[in-house]
Each structure stands twice: as C-alpha cells, then as structure tokens.
Image (cartoon, grey):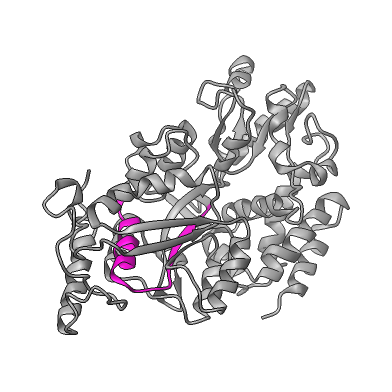
Amino acid sequence: MRSLKRSGLAGAAVLLAASAALAGCADDSENDGGGSAGGTAPGDGKAECEGMTEWGDLTGRDVTVYTSIVAPEDQPHIDSWKVFEDCTGADVKYEGSKEFEAQLQVRVQAGNPPDIAYIPQPGLLQTLVGTGKVVEAPEGVSENVDEFFGEDWKGYGSVDDTFYAAPLGANVKSFVWYSPKMFADNGWEIPETWDDMMALTEEIAQAGDIKPWCAGIESGEATGWPATDWLEDVLLRTGGPDVYDQWVNHEIPFNDDAVVEGLDTVGEILKNEDYVNGGIGDVKSIATTPFQEGGLPILDGECALHRMASFYAANWPEGTDVSQNGDAFAFYLPPIGDEFGSPVLGGGEFVAAFSDAPEVQAFQTFLSSDTWANEKAKATPGGGWVSANTGLEISNLSSPIDQLSAEIFQDPDAVFRFDGSDQMPGAVGAGSFWTEMTAWIAQGQSTEDSLTKIEESWED
C-alpha cells in the first residue's frame, strides 16, 4: 500500500494539529471545529495506518455519509473504509437513498445535513454551496486532488474559485459497445478515427444483413438524457473543449452554429433510417426504447454498434461475456480529426462536507487519496466501479471495461470534460434539453428548432 503521507494526509493532519494546539484545544474530545482529537490513534505505529493516525484517537466519533448509492452497490463502499476505521477508531455510518438529491437539500435547509455527501453533479454542488453550509475542503484534500486528479477535476469540485469537493468515482461516457465475436466473424476492425467508424457504418448498412446502430433514450421522467450525451460527446469532437465549456456555461447560445454542427453530426447516425434502429424499429423507436435495452440487439446479431457509457456493462444479461474477446465489449468513441486530441466525456461523484470536525476532515482526506482508490477497487471484485485517480493501480480492477476506463482516464493525451447537462441549470439540463432532444428523435423536429427551444428556456 502506498503511504498516505505521500498523498497529503500527514501534511494536512500536521497543519490541523498545529491549528488546534494554537487554539488550545489539541486534546479536546468534544472539538467540532477541525484540528486534532488528541490522544493516540488505535493504529499508531502500524505500517498500514501510516498517515491515518495524525488526527489522534477518533474512537467514539461518527462520520455520517449520505449518498444515492443503495444496496447492493453500497457494500463495496462500506468495505473500502475498514482500514480507515481500524486505524483511526472512527465509525463511518452509511445511508443510501433513491431520493437522495431532493432529500439532501431538505436536510440541509432544515439544519440537519450529513457530515459527508457524495454529490453526483457539479450543478448540485453549486446549489448546496449557495446555502452556506458546505465546508471548504482541507489542505490535504486539495493536495491530493492536485497530485492524483488534476486541474479539470479540481475545477468541477470548486465554486467561485473556492475548492470544496474532491472527486470520488467516475465513469467514461465516450464508449461504443460492440460484439468482439461479431467483429471477428466479419473481419471488421475497431475504428480509430471518426471517418473509419462512418466507413464501417456504411459497409454494414450496404451489406444489408443488420443495421449498423441501435439506440434507446427512454428513461421515464428522464427520457432523452442518452441523446444529450450523444450531443455532448460529438460537440467535444467537432467544436473542441473550449467551445464545449462556453456552451455549458451559456457564454454562447445553445443554438450556436457550432452546436448545430454537432447535433447535425449526431443526426447523420441517429436520424438515418439505413443506420438505425437495429432489431427494434425505425428512427422514432429510439425514443420509446428503454436505454437499458438499447444495446441488447447486439447479442442477437441485429445491430453492431451502441454508444453508451461504461456503466452499461451492468445492463448485459447475466452470463454475457463482457471482455475483449467475448460477447460484448466497448471501444473509445473516435475523435473527429486531430485538432482536439482525445476528448473524453464522463461523470462522477464529489465528496462534500458539512462539518469540519477532525474525524470528518480525516475521512475526506482518506477518500481523496490513492490508498482509498485502491482499497475501493479491491473491495469491488464484481466490477462496475472506476476512479479517475491516477494513483489507482489498474491491476486492482477486476472488470476489463473498468480497466479500459482507467486507462482512458490516465491517458496523458485525454481531454476530459464532465457531462454538460449535469452542469446546466436544472430547468435546462434536466428539463428542456431532455424533452427537445426527444422531440428531435420522436417528432422529427429539426436541429435548429430543437436547439432554439432549449435556448429560449435558459434563464440567466
């Protein structure tokens, strides 16, 4: 295990302890304002606890964690904290809820927030910071993020240039799912450029046996969100990261010419009756096909390609061999030209704190370290989790798709951008953007009309 001192834990703890001593509360077990708890931690002197004992004895102190991650996905998180609890004496109490986003805001407004919350969108973090209840991240967390994540990720955890929340888990959205067996049987090569991918698309369409693509954007009240991912991924490739950032921040209108070009490029696939919707129906069927089922025709040999995030791995039926030579796997959605490097669209969670008690700051710092990332990987033997933490050892990930995701995150040439709709005002990112993209598919609404209606819904 890599030393947590290298990850900034010890440095932050020394600063905290010094601050506490100056305040005359270095041995105050009731201290709720940061600093050291005093005493000797249970793991003091143990190699596996190096860097986690600097806050003193945290025995009897609870850290409450509130997230949207519910059973059975919660258990690997709980298991990943064992070393922290053993070394510090603190007890981490987990609570997951399907109503997390709404209930977290209610609890914060009522003055009953958790100590720690896993925030899935930068936009929600900004809203919570606006309440004045989120505590600025301690120095050790900031140092860890500088070392293991970088400037882009730190920016997503910041509001008005103040850093609050370190990244936690992450997912890659820039994937195209396919069948390695189908590709091998047909002699198809994984495309490395957009032109290669479109040439393959046309080759499959001309053969006439199957449709090149399949897709589904139905998701109950959230219907349309997979189509927003399509536009975000393509705009990163046609307009580049700077234009993408301007669009997300509404520094250019939603219907800017660059965005029109991006959506028209998406339409070359999703609105082409010759290319979609393999094994399901026509173009309009995309809007009524649950996103969980969108790629399944690949297994029946009815379509060849399906653009969807890394988390789609969980949607393949039990017994599906998800591997490089198996029934299903994914390749990186290729760049369009070479001007903008290797763009990566993704998402993830951020760790926000509502308390600066020593046990909370200790746990925050632990979660931002490379040590926790590797503990979490080892605690998730079934796969389905990855982090953008560059200290994560890829060999600790059990799933081939998780390993591929980690390789993409750790590629020095990758240009990462967070899901755009998750950063927009809720009325747009979780409202008009979804509905108008659905109308673009289901009603044949034009690109210009769809983007203009979204622009008109944006209130600055």
Task: Write down the region rendered in magenta.
Answer: 346-370
Q: Residue at x 79, y 43 (%)?
A: 286
Location of the N terminus by quadrant is top left
Q: Quadrant of the C terminus?
A: bottom right
Q: Please identify the residue farthest to the bottom as the structure is shown.
A: 23
Image location (x, y in percent) of residue 139 = 28, 70
Q: Which residue lies most toward the right here?
A: 443
**Quarter location, residue 25:** bottom left
Q: Is residue 300 left or right of residue 136?
A: right
Instruction: Relative to 48, say whether 25 is above or below.
Output: below
The answer to whether residue 64 is magenta is no
**Residue drawn at x 49%, y 61% as measured from the top left:** 66
Whether residue 342 is visible to the viewer of this picture, yes or no, is no
In the image, taking residue 433 as reference, residue 402 lies left or right, namely left
Q: Is residue 360 magenta?
A: yes
Q: Position of residue 306 (x, y in %)?
A: 66, 36
Is 60 or 431 nearer to us in this picture? Answer: 60
Position of residue 37 measured from the top left corner of the image (x, y, whole percent): 22, 70
Q: Is 357 on the left or on the right of 278, as rendered?
A: left
Q: Residue at x 76, y 52 (%)?
A: 220
- How many callouts does the rendering have? 0
Q: Residue furthest left?
A: 45
Q: Measured along the vertical axis of the image, is residue 196 above or below residue 140?
A: above
Look at the image and tell me whether residue 437 can be seen: yes
- In the picture as drawn, the residue positioned furthest to the top comes out as 185
Q: Position of residue 321 (x, y in %)?
A: 56, 23
